[in-house]
Image (cartoon, rainbow, N blue to C red):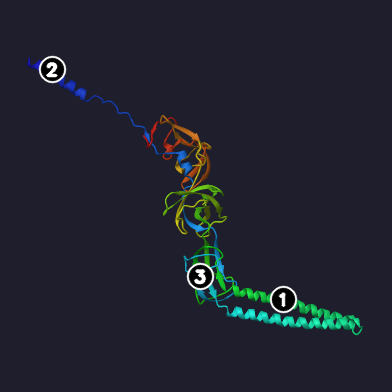
Amino acid sequence: MKNCKLLAVTAVSLALLLGGCGSQPKTADKPLLVKTQQAGLRAESQTGSYSGTVKGRYETNMSFQVGGQIIARNVQVGSRVRAGDVLMVIDSRDVLQKSNQGDAQVASARAQLDLAKRNLGRYTQLYHESAVSKATLDQYQANYDAAFASYRSALAQQAQGHNALGYTNLTAGANGVVSAISAEEGQVVAAGQTVMTLVQSGEMEVEINVPENRVAELSLGMPVSVSFWALQGRADGTIREIAPMADTVTRTYRVRISLPEPPEGMQLGMTASVSIKTAGSSMAEGAVLPLAAVFQNGDSPEVWVVGEDNTLTAKQVKVESLGDDTVRVTGLNASDVVVVAGVHKLHAGQTVRTEGD
C-alpha cells in the first residue's frame, strides 16, 4: 500500500515538473521605431527666418562743396533735423577773399572791354575815311573780341565765388536723422570729403543678410512677413532690392525689404525678424530633407515613405541641390511622411512605428 502511494506522489511530481518545464507562449515583436519628417511641413519653411535692422531707404553722405576749417557743428549723432537746417559751418574768410578777387577781375575785364570798344569805334571811323587799312581795323576788332571774352570769363568766376560763399554752410536737404559724424570742429576738410551721414526718415525699410546658398530662393517683389522685437504684431513687406554681389567679409547678400504700411512706433535701428511667405500646395516642391533620408536604388535616388498602415514604400525622387547636411528633392506629396534615418536597414512592405505612434 505504501508503494502505491509513493508511486502516485512520484507521478504527480513528474507531471508538475514536466508542466513547469514546458515552453511558454512567445511575445510578438514590436515593429521597428523610425524617425520621420513630413515633406510638406519642411518645404513651407525652407527659406527660414532672418534677423534684420530698420534702416532708411535713402542715406546721404554729406560734404562741403568748398574746403576750409570747421568752425561750428550744430548736431550730434542721433539728432533729428529738418530740411534747410544748418548742420556744420566752415570758416568763410578764404572763400570771401576769392569772391572779392572775382569782383576785381570783373572790374578789370570791364575796363579792358571799354577800352577795346572805344578803340574799335575810332579805327572803324578812320577806316571809313580811308585813313587806315583793313588789316589795322581787323586787329582792333580782334582786340575787342578778346576783351569781351575775358569779361565773360570774369563774370563766370565772379558768380562761382559768390556761390561758394553759400557753400560754407552745410544744410540738410531733407528731414532725417544724423547717423554718423566723421569730422569735428577745428578740423580742416577738403571739398567733397564726407563729414556726416544723414538718414532720411521719410521712408524706412528692413535690411537683412542672406547666405549665398539661400539667395537663389529669393526674388524681387516676393512677399515677406516682418515682426519687431519691440513692437506688437507683424507687418507685410516685399523684397525691393537684392545685392548683386556678396559682402567680401561675411559672404552674405544684402537684401532690402520695403514696408508699404509700417507699424506705428517703428524707429531706425530697431531689430526685426523677416520670414519668407510661401504658398502651400499639394506638392512639396523643393522639399528639404536630411541627407541620410535619401538612398540609391540603381541609378535612381529614393526615399522610404510610411503609409497609412505604417508599411514602407520606396518612392523615387529627383535631387535638386545639396546643402551641408541637407538635400532638396522634388517628387513628394506635401503629406508624405518620409523616414530620415537608418534607411539602409529597411525594406519594402516592412511595418514600422513613428514618433507619433
In the image, 174: left or right of 234?
right
Q: Residues within 10 Å of mark 2 (few under 14, many from 20)?
A: few
The CA distance from mark 2 to mark 1 is 144 Å
Count numbered badges in the picture.
3
Identified by mark 2, the residue type is Ala
What residue is disc 2 on?
8
**x and y, in percent, of residue 148 in the image:** 77, 77
What residue is disc 3 on?
182
- Which is more foreground, mark 2 or mark 3? 3
Q: Quadrant of the C terminus?
A: top left
**x and y, in percent, of residue 102 in the image:** 67, 79
The CA distance from mark 3 to mark 1 is 37 Å
Residue at point 50% right, 45% down? 277
What residue is disc 1 on?
153
**x and y, in percent, of residue 285 in the image:** 52, 40
Q: Earlier in the sequence, mark 3 or mark 1?
A: 1
Which residue is at the far left? 1
Q: Which element carries disc 2, helix, strand or loop?
A: helix
The CA distance from mark 2 to mark 3 is 113 Å
